[in-house]
């Protein structure tokens, strides 16, 4: 059973360009979460999605950032007009969406975004 | 809001036992999770406490005391490969869908 897959693993963009980060959840998982991690810090929640629905985007910056999880295909985190402060590791996690609180999240290897 | 406090660094020698503490402030949560991260790689799930008390999983155990707003991760028979960052995270439940992570504790195991 393949784990959570993310691509690309490394992404370099110049200021003002767009960055697209992809996440394929584990087989059988219908819930996807995106986190951002700066060096020496913990993971900061950004957005929680189910198929075709954004459940919670309270951690997402209001501008330039968007996320989707279409019926078919991977989840996409899109950052428009990137700035140097967007440089970070972006992790995706997925969970099966079990009822109750024990809905363990499994993380992908992350995408390291560098903005020049 | 919520906050989590963990020591930034812990060091120990092979074969020893180490305890990583996590204190928190929150208005409500379902449980406390622990994750391990090697060199900025994928965080991996270690343990989860929904109820007060000790949960044991092999060499790793985790403890939660809701009355003290406190938890810890206990690592026994330390091995070099245990050198990593360890994060506690408040579980807000699947409805809210997010884990609130602490800043992490860097564990270094010496031979």
Image (spheres, rainbow, N blue to C red):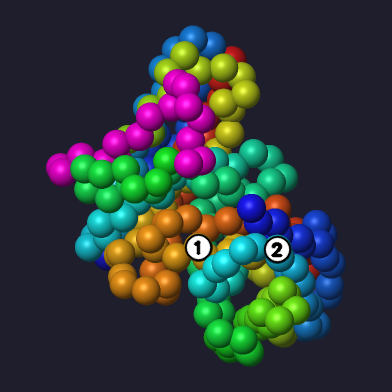
- Residue at position x 68%, y 40% in the image: A39
- The foreground one among A62 and B12 is A62
Q: Which sits earlier in the primary sequence, circle 2 or circle 1?
A: 2
Q: Nearer the viewer, residue B83 or B6?
A: B6
The secondary element bearing badge 2 is classed as strand
Residue at x 61% of width, y 19% of height: A84
For residue B25, the mark is 2
Range shown magenta: A58-75
Residue A27 percent location from the top left of the image:
24, 60
**On the image, which quarter does residue B51 sit in?**
bottom right
Instruction: Name the subunit of mark 1.
Output: B
Mark number, residue B106? none
Check residue A68 for magenta coloring: yes
Does residue B58 sit above or below B104 in this rendering? below
Question: Overall secondary structure of the magenta stretch?
Answer: loop
In which quadrant of the rendered image does the C terminus of chain A lie? top right
Please tell me whether mark 1 sits on a helix, a strand or a loop.
Answer: loop
Corner quadrant of residue B70? bottom right
Q: Are marks 2 and 1 in contact (CB under 8 Å)?
A: no
Of the numbered discs in the image, which one, if any, rests on residue B92?
1
Tell me if residue A53 comes above or below residue B90 in the rendering. Answer: above
Residue B60 visible here: yes
Give coordinates of residue B49: x percent, y percent: 56, 79
- In the drawing, does residue B92 fall left or right of residue B36? left
Q: How far apart in space, not on screen, are marks 2 and 1 (Cα)?
A: 13 Å
Instruction: Return the chain for callout 2.
Output: B
Q: Which residue appears farthest toward the front when viewing the image?
A: B27
Q: Assign the N terminus of chain A to one quadrant of the image.
A: bottom left
Image location (x, y in percent) of residue B106:
75, 59
Instruction: Determine whether A103 is above or below A25 in the image.
Output: below
> At x 42% / y 57%, what residue is drawn?
B97
């Amino acid at each position: 059973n393949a784990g959570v897959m993310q691509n690309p693993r490394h992404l370099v963009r110049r200021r003002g360009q767009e960055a697209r980060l992809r996440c394929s959840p584990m087989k059988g998982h219908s819930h996807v979460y995106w986190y951002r991690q700066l060096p020496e810090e913990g993971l900061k929640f950004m957005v929680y999605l189910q198929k075709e629905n954004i459940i919670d985007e309270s951690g997402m910056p209001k501008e330039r950032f968007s996320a989707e999880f279409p019926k078919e295909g991977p989840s996409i985190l899109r950052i428009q007009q990137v700035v140097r402060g967007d440089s970070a590791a972006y992790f995706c996690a997925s969970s099966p969406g079990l009822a109750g609180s024990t809905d363990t999240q499994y993380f992908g290897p992350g995408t390291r975004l560098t903005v020049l | 809001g919520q906050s989590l406090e963990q020591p930034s660094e812990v060091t120990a020698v092979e074969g020893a036992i180490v305890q990583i503490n996590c204190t928190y402030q929150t208005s409500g949560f379902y449980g406390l999770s622990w994750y391990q991260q090697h060199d900025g790689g994928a965080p991996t799930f270690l343990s989860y406490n929904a109820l007060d008390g000790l949960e044991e999983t092999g060499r790793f155990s985790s403890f939660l005391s809701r009355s003290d707003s406190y938890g810890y991760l206990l690592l026994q028979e330390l091995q070099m490969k245990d050198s990593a960052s360890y994060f506690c995270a408040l579980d807000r439940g699947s409805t809210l869908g997010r884990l609130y992570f602490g800043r992490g504790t860097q564990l270094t195991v010496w031979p």
